[in-house]
Image: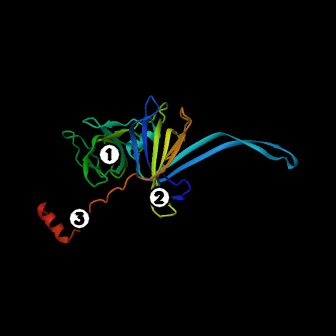
Amino acid sequence: MANILEQYGIKEVCDFTLYDIGADGKPTVPVLYLDTLKVSTLEQTAEDTSAKGGKGNADLIIWDFGKEINITLEDALFSAKSMAIMFGNGTVTDYTGASAYIMKTEKFVATAETVPVANSNTYSDASGWSGKYTAPDGKLYNKKNPKFFDAKGAVVTQFTKGETYFCSFDVLVDGAIIDIGASTFPGTYYAVGDTFARSRTTGKDEEFQLIIPKAKVMSENTITMEAEGDPSVFNMNLRVLRPADGKMVRLVKYKLSGTGSDPAADTTSIYHATDLQAKAAQSGK
């Protein structure tokens, strides 16, 4: 039996899992697993009122009310699913196929008067404009359906050498769409956080779990994108709701039952330059 007076410290961030909630109020399927959190915070607040009296009009009795529990999750990374849960209703739509295009716009300086024209829907480099889009990985992709405009936004059929022009074009993509609408708001989930608590007595970590039967993901959110400084973090704020049994949060400090077993020893491999030579020879480089 656990010693309820044994002391522990908590430092490590939680891994959080969000589950859909069934008609019986119990979790059904996991919809999001967060294992790259930087901060996970549980905060409880409440209001109070008091009866005052006597000399000095001091507090005599205090009543607490309006309990509020909030969970703040700060993630170093995002996924399409986590973004959909933070900003929409959790729905992610595949965007792929022969007509899955993304429009992009660029500017360039004309080096000649000729406006590029399609040749079997492929555009060659011409007049200072390239018919290929350079992706972040350095690979080139065909630009589709280019439209050329001057600085005033008028469609051009002929360039003037040395002038700046804009080109809007399509590129074929394979991705996902998250729609954020006026009537789409984040949902309510069953949330579980797993972390460790370190024993003061043994100095060893033991497992600790937060269970939130009903947590509403709040709508307020910000993504900061800047040229300098730290990369953006992705905040998910949850308001804990009162379930039917009134138990808003359950904290479980536990040890795994039984003796367990030691994992099998792994074989350690170290790569050397000879390995690189062999791989290069196999690839014909």
Residue 260 locus on image (x, y percent)? 34, 55
Q: Measuring 46% from the left and 47% from the top, which residue is drawn there?
A: 193
Left or right of 49 on screen, residue 179: left
Q: Of all residues shown, which one is farthest toward the right?
A: 55
Question: Dot 1 corresponds to which residue?
Answer: 159
Left or right of 39 on screen, residue 33: left
Question: Dot 2 corresponds to which residue?
Answer: 230
Question: Do the residues under discs 2 and 3 have CB atoms within 8 angstroms?
Answer: no
Residue 243 locus on image (x, y percent)? 53, 34
SS class, disc 2: loop
The residue mark sitting in front, 3 or 1, is 3
Left or right of 55 on screen, residue 197: left
User: Where 79 sits versus 272, above or below?
Assistant: above
Residue 52 locus on image (x, y percent)? 81, 43
Q: Nearer the viewer, residue 28 or 75?
A: 28
Give the mark nearest the N terminus, 1 or 2: 1
How far apart are the two marked residues, 2 and 3, measured between alpha carbons?
Answer: 38 Å
Q: Measuring 50% from the left and 41% from the top, which residue is drawn there?
A: 212
Question: Can the viewer see residue 232 in this picture?
Answer: no
How far apart are the two marked residues, 3 and 1, measured between alpha carbons?
Answer: 65 Å
Query: What quarter of the picture does the C terminus occupy?
Result: bottom left
